[in-house]
């Protein structure tokens, strides 16, 4: 078995991560902080065809786990008095002609109604496409650069999903607009504000917002994508890619250690004033989404907060108790495809880990799928 546990022995976690890898993943690294201390372990392999296991300190693309970083940055600017949480976003971004009813809060909570530039799935089963982010078309163009403004303009060229504030629907466009709002208010790139407000103060040295950078710096596991060409299945390594196609909807790179540092500090009240943290954690009644975080009730009776992410063969888990005292962070790599074939397996794997860490292994946890 390719397992690397560090520190205390947690056989139940070692067994769980091995069984998760055996269910179809390439590799997994897990970090748990709780009353028993810190535990890290990994299972599987760093790269297909090789035997080296993933590093427990390896970097990976975190997908939509980027969103809490963006939301926290906006809320730090709210705390500085530079952004009004319930003021029109159009005040700062007049070039897009946004509906004046759309506020910064609505962007962070996915209640703006703005079309999702990666495509919209409707309740009747229909799908309205956005930019190509799957299949051979994406693979062949995975080094292409998209400007954030380009993604927003594409979204705004499509009908809004609903009136601002009238409903909830997950839209990556909201977070690209939030990124642009940060840049417009501060006059600096998002990566610089992220460093000033979050990464620097917390000493997070292994987390980056790469912009158009295609490489993952430092030790990392590999991600894969599978598609068909002329009836033949082909699997390619897509670790190297230009994440500007998702922008602030999910472009960041981190480690399980840095994700723990961030989420523990955020939930523990060390990043935001208490009233703003309360706003962040107040969930929309439809789906349980606050301002960049999901609230989830566990089967054993507690509340946890989280935001997972998945993109092109890489996924992140980031969970915490309300006080930041118990956290679970993980990075997974796998062979992705247009059908999202591992989605159900991912949900079950996440349920098992949440159950083990936050409920002591008793009873199933709620479904939690990778947010794209």
Image (cartoon, rainbow, N blue to C red):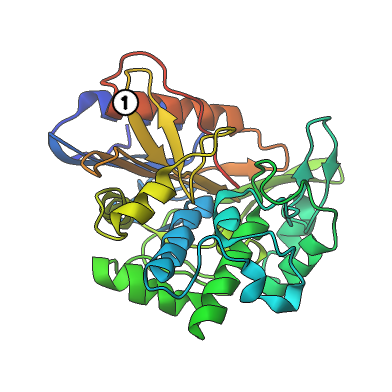
Which residue is depicted at the point 36% across and 29% down?
A: 354
When the figure is inspected, residue 320 is found, relative to residue 56, above or below; the finding is: above
Which residue is depicted at the point 47% across and 59% down?
A: 71
Position of the N terminus, as image quadrant, is top left
The part of the image, by quadrant, that contains residue 5 is top left
Q: Position of residue 213 (x, y in %)?
A: 54, 74
Disc 1 is placed on an element classified as: loop
Tell me, yes or no, if residue 243 can be seen here.
Answer: no
Tell me, yes or no, if residue 258 can be seen here.
Answer: yes
Q: Position of residue 305 (x, y in %)?
A: 38, 39
Query: Residue under circle 1?
Result: 302
Number of residues whose C-alpha sits closer than 10 Å to that of mark 1, classed few (under 14), some (14–19) or many (20 or more): few
Q: Is residue 320 left or right of residue 22?
A: left
Q: Position of residue 211 (x, y in %)?
A: 55, 73
Which residue is depicted at the point 29% across and 60% down?
A: 271
Q: Is residue 154 left or right of residue 185?
A: right
Front residue (pair 200, 136): 200
Q: Is residue 119 left or right of residue 213?
A: right
Q: How many marks?
A: 1
Q: Position of residue 249 (x, y in %)?
A: 58, 58
Front residue (pair 218, 230): 218
Q: Is residue 104 left or right of residue 35?
A: right
* Residue reaching furthest to the top: 363
Front residue (pair 288, 356): 288
């Amino acid at each position: 078995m390719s397992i690397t546990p560090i520190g205390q022995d947690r056989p139940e976690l070692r067994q769980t991560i091995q069984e998760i890898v055996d269910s179809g993943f390439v590799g997994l690294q897990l970090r748990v902080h709780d009353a028993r201390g810190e535990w890290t372990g990994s299972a599987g392999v760093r790269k297909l065809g090789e035997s080296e296991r993933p590093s427990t300190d390896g970097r990976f693309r975190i997908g939509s786990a980027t969103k809490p970083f963006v939301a926290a940055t906006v809320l730090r600017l709210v705390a500085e008095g530079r952004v009004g949480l319930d003021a029109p976003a159009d005040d700062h971004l007049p070039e897009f002609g946004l509906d004046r009813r759309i506020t910064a809060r609505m962007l962070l909570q996915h209640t703006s109604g703005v079309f999702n530039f990666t495509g919209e799935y409707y309740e009747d089963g229909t799908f309205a496409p956005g930019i190509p982010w799957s299949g051979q078309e994406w693979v062949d163009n995975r080094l292409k650069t998209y400007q954030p403004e380009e993604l927003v303009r594409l979204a705004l060229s499509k009908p809004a999903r609903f009136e601002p504030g009238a409903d909830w629907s997950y839209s990556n466009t909201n977070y690209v607009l939030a990124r642009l709002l940060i840049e417009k208010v501060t006059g600096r790139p998002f990566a610089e504000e992220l460093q000033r407000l979050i990464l620097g103060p917390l000493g997070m040295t292994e987390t980056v917002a790469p912009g158009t950078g295609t490489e993952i710096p430092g030790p990392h596991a590999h991600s894969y994508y599978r598609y068909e060409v002329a009836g033949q299945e082909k699997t390619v390594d897509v670790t190297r890619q230009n994440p500007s196609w998702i922008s602030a909807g999910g472009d960041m790179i981190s480690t399980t250690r840095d994700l723990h540092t961030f989420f523990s500090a955020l939930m523990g009240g060390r990043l935001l004033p208490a009233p703003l943290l309360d706003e962040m954690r107040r969930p929309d009644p439809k789906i349980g989404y606050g301002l960049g975080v999901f609230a989830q009730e566990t089967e054993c009776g507690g509340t946890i907060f989280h935001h997972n992410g998945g993109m092109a063969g890489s996924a992140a888990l980031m969970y915490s108790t309300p006080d930041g005292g118990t956290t679970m962070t993980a990075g997974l790599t796998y062979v992705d495809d247009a059908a999202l074939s591992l989605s159900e397996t991912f949900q079950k794997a996440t349920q098992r880990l949440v159950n083990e860490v936050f409920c002591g292994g008793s009873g199933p946890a709620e479904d939690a799928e990778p947010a794209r």
